[in-house]
Image: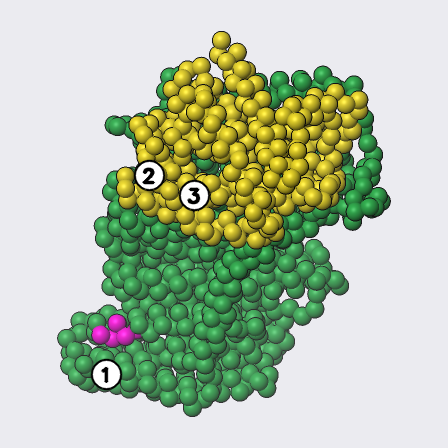
Amino acid sequence: MVDFLLSPFGAWSLLLAGGFLFYPLHRKTPGLALALFWLVQGFALAMAGLAAWRLWGGAEPFWFHTAGYRPPLSISLRAGWPEALVLLLVHGAGLAVATHFRKALAENASAAVLFLVLQAGAAGMVMTQDAFNLYVFMEISALSTMGLLAVQGRARLFDALFHAMGVEALAALFFLLGIGLVYHLAGTLSLAGLAAQAPLLQTPTGLLAQGFLAGALLLELKPLIANGPAINVYETTSAAMAAWLSTGAAAAMAMALCKLLPLFSPAILLGLQTAGLATFVVGHAAALRQSQTRRLLGYSSVAFLGFSVFFLCRPEPGLLWPLAVLWGVHALAKTLLFFLTDRAGPLTAGNARWHKLGLLASVLALLALPPVPAFWAKWDLVMLLARTQPGAFAILLAGFFVEAFYLSRWLREQWALAEESGSARPWPWPDTALAAIGLGGLGLACAALQSAPAREFANLALAALAALGLLSRAPRFAQKGLALLGAGALAWFAAGRLADPLAQLFLALFTAGYAVAVLAADSGPRMPRHFHGLMLAVFAGAVMVVAADGLFPFFFAWEWLAGATFLLIWQGDADGRAARQYLLFALASALFILLGFGLQQSLAPTLAWTGLSARPLVWGPVLLGLAIKLGLVGWHTWMAPSYSRAPRDFTPFLAGAVNKAAVFGLLLLLLPQLGRIASGPLEWLVWLGLLGAFAGAFLALFEENVLTMLAYSSMGQMAYVIAALGLATPTGNVAALYLSINHFLFKTLLFVVAAGVVRQTGTPLMYRMGGLIKRMPVSFVSAMMAVIAMSGVPPLGGFGGKWLLYMALMEKGQPLAAGLAFFASAVGFLYMYRFLQSVFLGQLKHAGRAVRETSWSAIAAQGLLIVGIMVFSVYPQPLLQGLLQIAGADRGAAFLSVAADGRVATALGQWQPTQIMIVVAVVFGVLTALLLANRQKVVWVRQFNLVFAGERPDRPETTHFAYDMFAHYRRALGAFYQPFALRFWEAAGQGLARLGHAAGHLQSGQFHATLLAGTALVVLLCLGALR
Amino acid sequence: MKILSIFLNVLLCGAYGILLGAVYNRIVARSQGRIGIPLHQNFLDLAKNQVKRTAIMHGIMFYLGPVFRLGGGVGLLLFVPLLPGAPGFANASGSGDLLLAMYFIFFGQLGMALGASESGHPYSAIGIARGLSQMTAFEVPFALAALAVAVQYGTFDVAAIAQAQQGGLFHWTVFTNPFATVAALIAFLGMTGQSPFDVVLAPQEIPIGPPTEYHSAYLAMMQLNRALFQVAKILLFIHLFFGGGANLLSLMAKVFVLFGLPMFVDAAFPRMRVDQSIRFFLRLPTALGVAGILLARWAH
């Protein structure tokens, strides 16, 4: 008896008993009745947990036979692993929903009774082992749900409810028909008995019965074209009921489907899978155009149900855990979102913070970004699918992207609403805390369950999250030091474990970039609150990228890096537009990488970079995914908004170091493939790269915003790296590495200077500056050094990068490409001159007189970078030798070599960096000395001591030549200066929206259309089975 | 010894460049019915500017602008061998190859641009913007021509390219790859800054252009650079397209001819706007450069 009571069956009995007892008890003692209600709810959840715990400990599945007999004389209930997990979800969701619903439940006894019965019905559906009993519980659940919806008394809801009841009745009709036929054939309705007599169900009558049963369950699971009424219910009901429909009710119904799956023929299973996949894709597509939160979340839930149906109907083993985890995350995140958006009126500032955190956590969980456990689950499922059905796998990935598209848009809108904080309003902490605690707990549990490398990464990610929380609360003066300390420890730890020189090189680059950016960062109150914590998270992501020893850890690190970068960009981006743009492109990048990894699994399962196939079908998507993060032309549109809207002190790290993670990834991909990949397919990458260099240079040329200009400059410079890698030669790889290191040095320096300038002047527009050399001389020198290093003008290191690139291009027989590179490089010279002229030279504005040099810490950071540039320029030979080793260019008849006398040579030419530096220094020194010899004659003049056009100017604004400086270039080549990529992506976005509109039409809420569609679905399933 | 030879080479090229400037001034004057300046006039101007009493100063960068400019000219001269194969005339050409010379051309331009910009004079900045824009355009055919030569001879080594053209007149690149040579020569016209590409300095609208605020010792440095830089560039062209210099005399003769080429074009063509010259350089000369590369690949 005690065993029975302390089991899910006991809880189920109590729920039923509670339902019967509540009303009479409530009439006499309402408080006691309510106490009973909560007790029973809590008890049900506890028993589900206890059952799961005992099963985890090795216990056998629990059975309960009614009336003491075994089937077919009685109905039995079962609680094994799947049932225990679904019960946990059903009762957990029930408790959360009841908590949110608490006022209504306290005021309306009918609602409480219906809720208890609803829980009992759902639990019965989960545990029953009898087909007719399943029908009974389905009806109990459906009726109590309808009752609960009806007691809310909303006119629009009644309308939606009536339509939903129609679908429900149709499903019930088909289910009963199916049961009748099955009983006619098998003489039993026990599921075990039916499974034993499965051959009888393969007759035409049996197949028809299967079609009816499968069709009925499919209708209950809100499939494509028959889910319009369900969406209308989502829209019109309360948040609590919407959450229940999306989680508990859906989980119980999915479990009902699972019970009957062993009876279904392959044709029926295929039909269900097809319907599931179509529902997943079209559901997400329909959500694209939704402006109403409930409908959007409703479509999202429907799509998730389709996803579940698709996987539940697959024959592969090992699907239980990933699906359970996904369901858990879905339930927690959706519940939280339904609750959080159940708001009227503004939030207080304090509430808004928690509100936004809840929104963010839920959306990131739905997007399955690590360390949310759904990440592991999605990886397992998609890899499994990729091995068997690559086509469906690709469709699934497209669906994931569409989901990210509308969820990120919606998040931005909700965020903006939350920002409008004002009057005080209580925040429903019990609801959200419940879900948040569950989410965190599930994350920890999953993190602990992973294989060794992934667990390390998960732990690191969780530690980074903890550090984020701690750093945000630390005093501002201590944040910088603590952040540097934390990063130093992480780098030290990672360095000790990395043996690969390539990984060591990039670890050094990331560490240096992080340290310089943090050193240069502002410490004042204007700094975003979570800046240092998120910087550390981004750094941790970069470290994980270099430490990843396989495809899965790399993908984990890649996704983590994307998530952390997105959050940090949002810190500086008030309306979140740029951050969302970044997120979408970052997710597109991740999905392409996943596509490549998945297609590899379909050829030969491997999780090692070296095992990747040399077929373009595999490396092509991976390469594209990685190149997106480098701003590959056409995919570059995220760069300018992200770099210019991110916190200014983050951009040096982002542009200088973080984007090199993609270079590292490309080298991981391409180095093992040297000589294996046919050069033909890669040749387009060279041209795309150089086209990007050209486009980036032109975009920068006409840009007035200094941060945007530098962003386009980054696009152009990284395009050289892409081109060099596309050559797929050791020399090309050396050039790519060299260019990357040089880019790190000068671009970090430029962004540090730009951050200081923008901070001091209060504007990013260059034409509003001018003459700042007088106020910020150190920054000017730094900028000039960076510009020379970037332009490729000898004697600084930039020339080496260009020289290596030309050599690599010529080695590969690409002189025309070299010509294009030269042109792009020359245009780069133009915009960098413009940067110096517009910002530092020319006329000092009146407002500029109050400007002071940037902070000492920023100057120190600039100094460190200049030292780096000089060392790199004067004596790059040891580094080059290391790069030759990494790129495999030191073996065999190498084209490129570093001689003992310091000469860097190829069969085509040579370059002596140290000697060039000496020559230039001597010439410059002698000439300066000559000029200095006449120094006594120098007379300093005042600012406006000049004459032009017969006038003596008195206002710097009329004299500073800066705005649209290269207008003649626009006149000459304006036809090429069109925002082709922007227009393309805008059109793509509009196309997606139209697709959403069309998908919405497919899922009409019209009564007759839905009934017809539902009937058609069942008929199709039956025909499919019979054929 | 090496330093001494380099010094003498620079001195020789500077003096020859200044002298050629005067010679061509006289030729132009004669063609216009004037007598023209005496041959030593440019030397006198240089000395006069160098010893002027005062020099205004707008700031450190302004001060260093001419140093950068002349440094660029001298540096280019040093990185290009005077007589390929003759050790005493190799200068510091062992430091790099053709790519070094092509990129070092930017060194002086950048320094000058920064220096002139610090003066705050809008005409300086306007001139620089024009000059740099035009430069990026004419560098394209020049770069393509240089790449064609590199493809043709299989090296970027300037001395080796010059050596490869020995053996007869028709071994010169001008005959073996006329497309590349014509593209480079048109680019050369742009480099000299004479009509039809003289809107940068705009000599008729004094004062305008980068040197607007420069005078006295600064101007002297820039005058010296003009002579040196011109000779250095011509040397490069001779080595790439006109068979190099077998000896000093033939080299000086070739320099003389090439120095005069822009004069004739200057007399015949009106000035282009910057956008026109950009379009011009990126059309026919660039197409010729591409043709030069294709020819080089096809033939070699």
Tell which residue pokes out farthest to the front in this image.
B33
User: Which quarter of the rendering shows the N terminus of chain A?
Assistant: bottom left
Q: Chain of mark 2?
A: B
Which residue is denoted by mark 1 in the rendering? A1023
- Tell which chain the image draws in green: A
Give the quadrant of the C terminus of chain A: bottom left
Residue A270 belongs to magenta span: yes
Front residue of A907/A894: it is A907
Name the residue located 28 percent from the left edge and 39 percent from the top edge.
B300
Q: Nearer the viewer, residue A888 or A85?
A: A888
* A361 displayed left or right of A128: right
Check residue A51 for magenta coloring: no
Rendering coords of residue A841 (x, y %): 71, 38
Q: Position of residue A788 (x, y in %)?
A: 57, 33
Residue located at (37% from left, 48% from top): B291
Mark 2 — residue? Answer: B176
N-term-proximal mark, 3 vs 2: 2
Discs 2, 1 touching: Cβ within 8 Å: no
Looking at the rendered structure, the kind of residue marked 1 is: Leu
Would you call the spot at circle 1 few (<14 residues within 10 Å), some (14-19), or many (20 or more)? Answer: some
Question: Up-down: is A45 above or below A776?
Answer: below
- The quadrant in which residue B63 appears is top right
Labels 2, 1: front one: 2
Q: Chain of mark 1?
A: A
**Spot occupied by residue A275 in the image (x, y as percentages of width and height):** 33, 74
Q: Which residues are magenta?
A: A267-272
Q: Are marks 3 and 1 in contact (CB under 8 Å)?
A: no
- A163 above or below A709? below
Q: Decide if residue B185 is on the left or right side of residue B124.
A: left
Residue carrying label 3 = B182
Q: Is residue A776 left or right of residue A304?
A: right
Q: Amino acid at mark 3?
A: Val
